Structures are given as C-alpha cells and as structure tokens.
Amino acid sequence: MPNYEIRYLDFDGACVGTLFTPCASEKDAKVLAHAMRLPGTKRMEVWRGPELIYERPQSQRALAAEAARIAARCAASA
C-alpha cells in the first residue's frame, strides 16, 4: 500500500499539522484528508512521495490543468 502525507495549512500557508498514512488508493487518501481536517485549516495537500496529488482549494495551475484535460476529452469524443 502506498504511503501518503497529508498536510494541513493555515491561511498564511504555515503548517498546522501533518498526517503520514498508508492508503489503498489516492481516493482513500483524499477522503481521509477531509475526514481528519484540523480546526483552523484553510488548505490541505495530499502528497505521495514528491508528487502533490491533491489540494484544496485548488491552485490556479491545477484548475488550468484540469480544464485542459476536460477539453482534450471533449475534443477526442467529438
């Protein structure tokens, strides 16, 4: 099972808390991140090794990448 690091950040980006845990999938890690959310948390990040796989709220870069993926799927199905 892969290991994940869940980081909880305050409004200024300072770390409020960190959770290290194995999860069966990325989806399980994301659900756990929301379930274990700490008071005062404004942002959360889920990491698998050096790769950021999830963040809330999403950054503009992540939103642009998701929009590009959706546009590519739409173009491929047209």
Image (cartoon, helix red, strand yellow):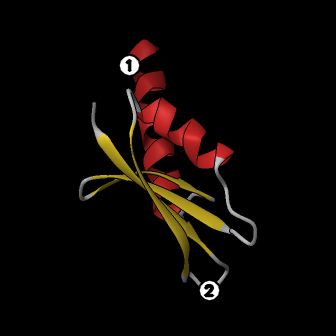
Q: Residue at x 53, y 63 (%)?
A: 59
Left of 54 or right of it: where is 9? right
Which of the image's four quarters has the N terminus?
top left
Q: Is residue 70 visible?
A: no
Residue 52 picture quarter: bottom left
* In the image, farthest residue toward the top: 77
* In the image, farthest residue toward the right: 39
Q: What residue is pinned by disc 1? A: 76
| Type of the residue with mark 2 | Asp
Question: Where does the image place residue 28, in percent across and percent down from the top left?
Answer: 49, 31
Who comes first in sequence, dot 2 or dot 1? 2
Q: Residue at x 48, y 43 (%)?
A: 66
Q: Nearer the viewer, mark 2 or mark 1?
A: 2
Query: Total marks drawn?
Result: 2
Residue 17 picture quarter: bottom right
Q: Residue at x 67, y 43 (%)?
A: 35
Q: Nearer the viewer, residue 77 or 5?
A: 5
| Type of the residue with mark 1 | Ala
Q: Is residue 68 visible?
A: yes
Q: Nearer the viewer, residue 64 or 62?
A: 62
Vertical order, 77 against 69 (above or below): above
Considering the numbered disc 2 on the image, is that residue within a helix, a strand or a loop? Answer: loop
Question: Where does the image place residue 38, in percent across and percent down from the top left?
Answer: 68, 62
Left of 78 or right of it: where is 48? left
Q: What residue is pinned by disc 2? A: 12
Pointer 1 local density, CA inside 10 Å: few below 14, some 14–19, many at least 20: few
Question: Where does the image place residue 64, in percent across and percent down from the top left?
Answer: 49, 53
Q: Residue at x 67, y 80 (%)?
A: 11
Pointer 2 local density, CA inside 10 Å: few below 14, some 14–19, many at least 20: few
